[in-house]
Amino acid sequence: MKTNPKIDSLQLMLTDLRTRNEAIRHKAAFKGCQPEFQSLVTKLIKQLEDDLSTEKKLIRD
């Protein structure tokens, strides 16, 4: 299968966002912005999943 740098980078970023980074989450909790932080992570994951889906579709067509 051919590699696609854009698909690879989207998949890596999604993996990174889904990985529980305790140091960053601790900072968000300390600053009192944990709900806002989690909301932003969720939005980013959704956007990246949509971009990944679009890229995969373009390759298939």
Image (cartoon, helix red, strand yellow):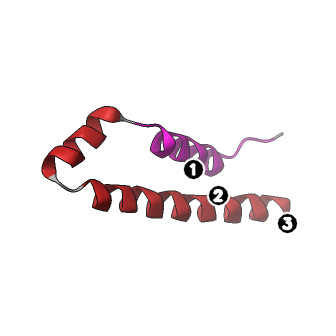
Disc 1 marks which residue? 10
**Which label lies toward us, 3 or 1?**
1
Q: Are marks 2 and 1 in contact (CB under 8 Å)?
A: yes
In the image, what residue type sits under mark 2? Leu
Which residue is painted at 22% across and 56% down in the image? Answer: 33
Report the side of 52 relative to 17 (left or right). right
Of marks 2 and 1, which one's residue comes earlier in the chain?
A: 1
**Rendering quarter of residue 58:** bottom right
Q: Give the class, few, some or many, for how many residues have Cα within 10 Å of label 2's Cα (few <14, many ≥20).
A: some
Q: Is residue 19 magenta?
A: yes
- Distance, label 3 to label 2, CA atoms, is 14 Å
Q: Give the class, few, some or many, for how many residues have Cα within 10 Å of label 3's Cα (few <14, many ≥20).
A: few
In the image, what residue type sits under mark 1? Leu
Disc 3 secondary structure class = loop
Residue 60 position, x and y percent, is 84, 60
What's the mark number on residue 52?
2
